[in-house]
Amino acid sequence: MHEVLAEALADERTGEAPPLAFMSGPSFADELARGMPTGAVIASEDRRLARDVAATLASERLRMYASTDVTGVEVGGAVKNVIALAAGIAEGLELGMNARSAIVTRGCYEMRRLGHLLGGKQSTLTGLAGIGDTFGTCFGPMSRNRRTGERIGKGEMLGEILSAADQVSEGVPTAAALVKLIQERDHSYRIDLKYPIIFGVADILKGSRTPLEGFQDVMRDPLRMEMYELQPPAESNGEDAKKTVLRERETALDLRESSLRTLEDALRQRELAVEAMEKRASKIQQQNRGTALQNLAAKQAA
């Protein structure tokens, strides 16, 4: 967004854009209007501007922080709406708090991964503009995206929900936009396994998967390590670049091995099912033979 605004507001003669600042964090407008305590972040590439705006807005009821990581703040503000849709869908399906907590946590990891890919800082995404805003949006009763997800989980049609809504659910168009962005920017192995929440929500919204199928697919994903450390970008040459390539290969091999184990487990289950069916068929066949022999003996005796 900051790149779009910079281009739109740039001076026609010099091409230079004015300094810009962005506010983000868990800040529901209704609570702000009522003067309830709130914490938020002002992000600007101009450090002094970020501090000045934060100081101007700060009060006893509004705690402001400054940041120069505009990209990280924007990633957090976008991805948290999609995570909130997923949390709402889980609530609508009545999957329980365990499932909702897991979905939100894994969604935050996808947020961190995307932020890393785009050049955002991990510290930003673990702060108010990232995880903080995500908590409020995923669990807050005033969250539009959570409510929309909940209605989808209960079986309502997306078109009907949006047509009757008096507020915008930003996560709906954002999900498809994030999938497109990830496909364009992340060329690593099996990106669908690296962003299952974002990709799953996008599929549910476009109707290619039902809400229940979406969560079943997440539960059936290949088993793997919970977290992979997101390394800082390496130079194009040197040992750091080689280490990064090796880490990517190790991650790919790990995912492939997990996929193979999942496939082996599925084949094993099928084999057991076939074996059980064969045993049942053999038992029925034996019973039928026994019945036929009894009938034959009865006829001969008669």
Image (tube, rainbow, N blue to C red):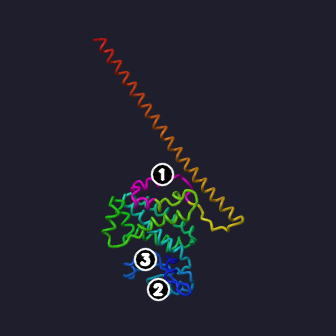
Against 251, residue 83 (above or below) is below
Q: Which residue is mark 3?
A: 27
Q: CA distance from mark 2 to mark 3?
A: 13 Å
Q: CA distance from mark 3 to mark 1?
A: 35 Å
Task: Label 2, secondary structure: give it.
Answer: helix
Question: Which span is picked out in magenta?
Answer: 200-226
Q: Which residue is mark 2?
A: 57
Q: Residue at x 34, y 59 (%)?
A: 154
Residue nearest the observer in this picture, 9 or 200: 9
Of labels 3 and 1, the one closer to you: 1
Residue nearest the observer in this picture, 8 or 291: 8
Is 202 magenta? The answer is yes
Q: Residue at x 33, y 58 (%)?
A: 155
Is 223 magenta? The answer is yes
Task: Label 3, secondary structure: give it.
Answer: loop
Q: Where residue 237 sits: x, y (%)?
A: 70, 66
